[in-house]
Structure formats: structure tokens, C-alpha cells
Image (cartoon, rainbow, N blue to C red):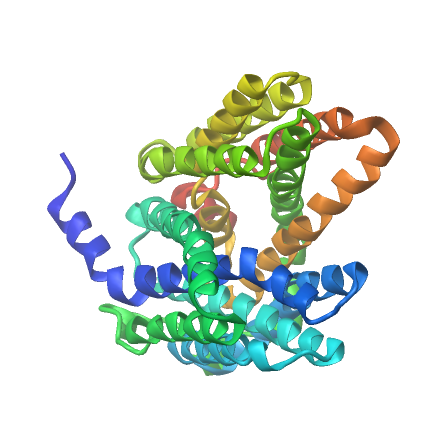
Amino acid sequence: MADPSEVAALRRIIRPVYLPTFMNGIAISMLVPVLPLYLRDAGLSLSATATVLSAAGLGSIFGGLPAGLILVRLSEKQVQSLALATMAITVATLGWITATLALLTFRLAFGLALVAFRLALQSRVRRVVATRIRGRTMAYLGGSSRMAFAIGPVLGGLILDLTNFETTFAVCGGITLLGLIGSIGQMEGEELDPTTKALRPGVIKSMRLHGRRLLRAGFGCSLVVTAREGRYVVLPLIADDLGLSPSAVGALITVGTSAELILFPVSGHLMDRYGRLFAIVPAFSLMSIGLALLAAAHTSFMVGVASIIIGLGNGLSSGTLRTISNDLAPVDSPAPFLAGMLALQDAGRVLGPLVVGVTADAIGLSGSTAVLAIILVLGIAHLVFVVGETSSLRADVAR
């Protein structure tokens, strides 16, 4: 039976943590079907469209350390609120912009704000939430994002069908702003910050002190994210090669996404009760098995089974990378470390599709999918044998 005090602690962060994450997730995922259509409708070439779509990811990669610098000087709540407001503005005004340079600028700004929001939220949770429920907190955080991504694309397409691009982007920005309802509130326990801003080392000093730990942990996380992101590319392409219709491809992706929602609560329980690796190893092992099966798939049934296995593994991995980052973040200045971890993970988000593109040209889609499975196995090995268990006792000793 769950500890009533722990349940109460999790309930207290619904409004300041899960509500902003859920609303922001819906807004981001609304753009998945809408933004590419808008860019093509605006007359952008395929290469320009791809560049604009990738700009947010690049903004997140290069914005991690600047966001950490800002967070050293401002409170998490202030950064979280400013980031949400910036994202809302840059999204709501997209429908009135057609110049490629302006679109690039707005998407870069969105990426910078997104990484600042993620960093502030993660730092805020780390400082306020008790270590004994950190795994569950982060797993539910990942679960709220997964639920949002199950709603957003459908909502975005529906609004666009009923209205126009300008209205759709305005609604998207409005949904983002709803996250401010939670962000501007005071989270219980925030007054218990033991380290004042004046005593925290700067970003450069923090990177010098903890850079080796950051690179050691971040490399394994980056490998995992590379495989995670690559599967979004290979799954629809393999399904298309087998002759499946676009609606069937969409259904397969939806099935995999739905499977993710089944196991994310289990992830947090495993991490808090038994240790982080008890969730990490089975989760990413399932994903690697699913990728291997996808590489060998020659029927729609096999693709569907692979999609479900990958989804179950990804659901079981909910919150694992965030939890590792929080476990290893130094007590004196966690923000720069967390920013560096986010930047390395965002690098994996960019590398995933690139790895698929390069390897698919050389050895075909099936070979490319097998490469993703191998990368994921290497990521598991690195997290197990190089990073090791990062739960509170060992992490505290490491500090």
C-alpha cells in the first residue's frame, strides 16, 4: 500500500509541475502535423522546411548552458514562467510569419525557451521533492508528457480542419499560457532552499568541477536518446515500404504510443524501491528487442508487434534520464550540470534522424534499424558499467 504522506506529496505538485508540463506537451505536439503543412503552404522548399523544423532542436542544444547561467541568477519559478510566456508568444504569432529567416528566429527562440522551461522545472522538482519519491515524480512527469503527445496531434489537426493556420497557432499559444496557472504558484517546501544564489559557483567553475561526471553520464544518455529518436524515423518508413496506407502507419504509431502509457507508473516505483537500473535495464532492453524485431519485420503484423514492444520499453523508461540527471547533479550548483545533461540529450535528438539517414543510404532501412538497436545496447552497457546505480546513497557518496 502506498504511503499516504508520499501520495500527498505527489498530489501537491500536480498544479506547479504536472499541469505546466501537460499543457506545454499538448501545445508542442499540436505542432507536429500543423507546422510542416504551414511551412509548405507558405511556399518554403523541402530543405528550408526541414531547416526550420530542426531549428527548435538546435535552439535547445545551444540554449542549455545559457539557460543554466540564467537559472543561477533567477529563481526556478521566474525562469519557468518566462520560458512559458516566450514559447506562447513565438507559437501564437507563427501564423503571421512567412519569411524564412523570421521563422528560423522564432523556432530558435522557442527551442531556447523550451530547454529553459525543462531545466527550471527539473531543478525546482529536485530541490523541493524528497529523494525517496524522486523516481516516481520524474516518471509521472514523463508520463504526463506522453499523455499530452497522445492528444496534441489529433487536436492540432482537428482545429486546423475547422479553422485556419492563424487560429490553430493562436490556440496552441493559449494552451501554453495555461501552464502559467501552475508555474506562478508557490510550491510547498520551496522556502527550504539550503543554498543561496550568492554562494553558488558560476557556470564555468561548475563545469570545471563537475565536467567529467557530466560527460560520463551524458554520453550514455545521449546514446539512448539517439536510438529513441531514430525509431520515430524508421518505423513509418519501414511500414511504408511494406505497402501500408498512411492511415495504417498512423494507427501503428498510435498503438506504440498507447503502449507507452501502460508502464510509466511502474518505472517510478522500480526506481524508488529498487534503484534506477532496475527500470533502466529492462526498459531499454525491451526497446532494443523491439528495434531488432523491426529490423527483421517483413509483415505488418511484425511491425505492429515491434511497435508495441518499443512502446512498452519507452513507457517503462519514463523519467529515468531525468532521475539520473537529478541524482548526479552537484548540491552546490545543480543548474549548470542539469543544463549540460539536457544539452547532451538534445544532441541525441538531432543525431537520431541523422544516423538513420546516413546508415539507411549505406545499408538500407533494416540495417539502419539494427544499428539503432546496437546503439541502444551500447547505451545500456555504458549506463550500467560506467555510470552505475545513481540512487541517493551512491549519488551522495559520489558528491
Residue 128 is left or right of residue 100, and the answer is: left
Determine the residue located farthest toward the front in the rendered image: 162
Instruction: Name the residue: 80% across, 34% down.
Output: 360
Which of the two residues, 34 or 390, is positioned nearer the viewer here?
Answer: 34
**Where is residue 105 shown, x and y percent of the image?**
68, 78
111 shown above or below 387: below
Residue 218 is left or right of residue 281, and the answer is: right
Residue 55 visible from this viewpoint? no
Instruction: Name the residue: 37% across, 63% down.
Output: 23
**Where is residue 320 shown, x and y percent of the image?**
46, 43
Residue 181 is left or right of residue 299, and the answer is: left
Instruction: Name the residue: 68% across, 22% down.
Output: 295
**Where is residue 117 shown, x and y percent of the image?**
48, 69
Q: How many marks?
A: 0
The quadrant of the picture occupied by the N terminus is top left
124 shown above or below 146: below
Determine the residue located farthest toward the right in the rendered image: 362
Tell me where residue 192 sits by quadrant: bottom left
Which of the two residues, 23 or 185, is positioned nearer the viewer here?
Answer: 23
Residue 234 visible from this viewpoint? yes
**Where is residue 310 shown, x and y percent of the image?**
52, 29
370 shown above or below 129: above
Instruction: Name the residue: 29% across, 75% down.
Output: 181
